[in-house]
Every structure is written in C-alpha cells, then in structure tokens.
Image (cartoon, rainbow, N blue to C red):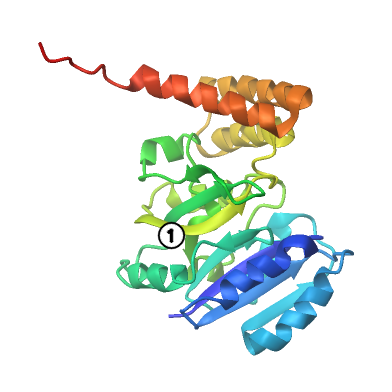
Amino acid sequence: MRVSIVIACLNGGAVLARCLDSIAGQTFTDIEVIVADGASSDGSTEILHRYSEAFGAALVWFSEPDRGIADAWNKAVVRATGDWLLFIGSDDALASPTVIADAVSRLALADQDCRIAYGRVLLVDDAGRVQEILGRSWSARDFRSCRFNLPHQGVFHRRVLFEGGARFDTSYSIVSDFDFLLRELMFAEPMDIGDLVVCRMRVGGISNRPQWAPRGIAEQIRLYRSHVGGMSPILYWDMAKAWIKVALWLLGGDALVSSARGIYRGRSLRAIRPPVRKES
C-alpha cells in the first residue's frame, strides 16, 4: 500500500522544513509527497530543492500561481499514485514517526467500498501546547446537517475517489474539504480509525483564524442550502457566535479568544455533566 501526502504551500518557508521532516522520519517508507506551491516568494522553493535530494523520486513538487487551497489540491491529485491520499498544510506536522504505519495497518482492514477513513488531529499553539483534539465518533446526522466536519488533516481518501473526475470546489475558500466529503458521504459511511492522532495542526490556519470565522460559517450555510436545502437556525446562531469571536479578537487578540473559548466550554460541560450523587 502506498500513501500520497499532499501539501498545499504558499510562503510557508518558516514551517515547511518541519512538515517535511515529520514525513521523512516515518517508519513506513512507501510514501509519496506532493507539494503544490502557489508561487511562493519567501524561499519555499529553495527548501523544496534541498529536500528533493533527500526524498528523491518520492517528492514531487511544482510552483505556480493558483486560486487557493482547493485549486492547489486539484492540481496535486492528478499527480498522485498512492492508494490513499492525505492532505495537510505546510504548517502541519505528522503526529509521530509511526503514525503512517499505524494508519496503514488500520486502512488495510477497510472494506473495498469504503473510500474515506479518518483519525484525530491535535490543534496546537506555536509552542506545541495542545489546544484541542479535533475529531470524534461518526455521526451521520450531525455531519449531513453541516454541524460536524471530519478533521481534514486526519482524513485518508482512496485515490479512486478522484479517478472519476471528482475535484474540490474552488469557489469555497475555507470549507472546500467539507463540500467534497459531503458529496461522498451523504449516502456512504466513513471508517473511523479510532483514537489515532494523525497530525498536529498549528493554530493560525485559515480554518481556525477568528477573523475568518464569519466567512467560514457563511460557507457552511451555503453548504447546507446546497446539500440539505432550506435554512438552518443552528448555523445562523453559529454565525452570531462567529462575529462575537471576531469582536473578542479585535479587543484582545488570540489570547482573549482562547480564554473565552475555555470558559464557554467549561460551562457547557458543567451544563451536561450529571450531578454527583452523595452517599448518605
């Protein structure tokens, strides 16, 4: 089994080497790396030239202008030769040296008609401290109502998905992965490969920046209308929370947003936690 790891990169020179090192250190060796660089001007291509010597033919890369992450992914998938594809960003890193070997052992158990499998992703800050664990057990209802997405840096896609011409919709700047998965999983089921942490995703990516939250929810509302139909009051409430997040970010930056998130989650957990029965 071969795994293709697709990396979308634009001026990621400060973090790209760490990402590539996390792949180079894998115990599983049948890995193909495809880097879609969007004509970076910060030295990213020089880094790719340097790593080409270490990876050899296992590293395929190109650098040209694109229309965003979805466009970069679409250019990469036509070059992929792996049985399964994993999409990560240049500021992400594989979680451990054995993660691909562990994933392959689980993917080998997937039914032939299973075309999506997923694990977990750690959201970490610049110091490497874990902020959140992304991913949970599959819920068809939550997913198909656009309330829950699979953690994309932990999602493995069978290459056969793309052989029929399926591509990421470039009109979405934030949730093109969600749209792609919805098209596949509206009537199919993914394989949950359990608590395997596939990737460490750094805070600050386009999908988790507070200032981009309203746009992300607006795109989710569009997803709901496209795939489900009608209106979703819950998503409109999420839009209100997204604007609150922007206001907090403008007032106090990421630190205030993080503190508010912790307080909100703490209260939510207390609200659903059953009371402790005291023994008489």
Question: Could you tell me which quadrant the C terminus lies in?
Answer: top left
In the figure, is residue 143 to the left or right of 18?
left
Q: Residue furthest left?
A: 280
Q: Which residue is mark 1?
A: 116
Q: Find numbered disc 1 in the image and state the secondary structure of the residue it sits on.
A: strand
Q: Is residue 39 left or right of residue 251?
A: right
Where does the image place residue 43, in percent across and percent down from the top left?
86, 69
- Going by the numbered disc 1, the residue's amino acid type is Ile
Q: Is residue 166 visible?
A: no
Question: Is residue 84 in sight in this rendering?
Answer: yes
In the depicted structure, whether residue 154 falls above or below residue 228: below
Q: Is residue 80 left or right of residue 70?
A: left
Residue at x 79% of width, y 81% of height? 49
Q: Is residue 52 above or below residue 256?
A: below
Percent coordinates x, y for residue 139 in the rendering: 36, 40
Q: Residues within 10 Å of mark 1 (few under 14, many from 20)?
A: many
Quadrant where the N terminus lies? bottom left
Q: Is residue 7 above or below residue 48?
A: above
- With 23 as the anchor, is 41 left or right in this view? right
Q: Residue at x 60, y 24 (%)?
A: 260
**Quarter residue 48 falls in:** bottom right
Residue that lies at the very extreme toward the right in this rendered image: 41
- Counting from the top left corner in percent of width and height, residue 90 is at 69, 62
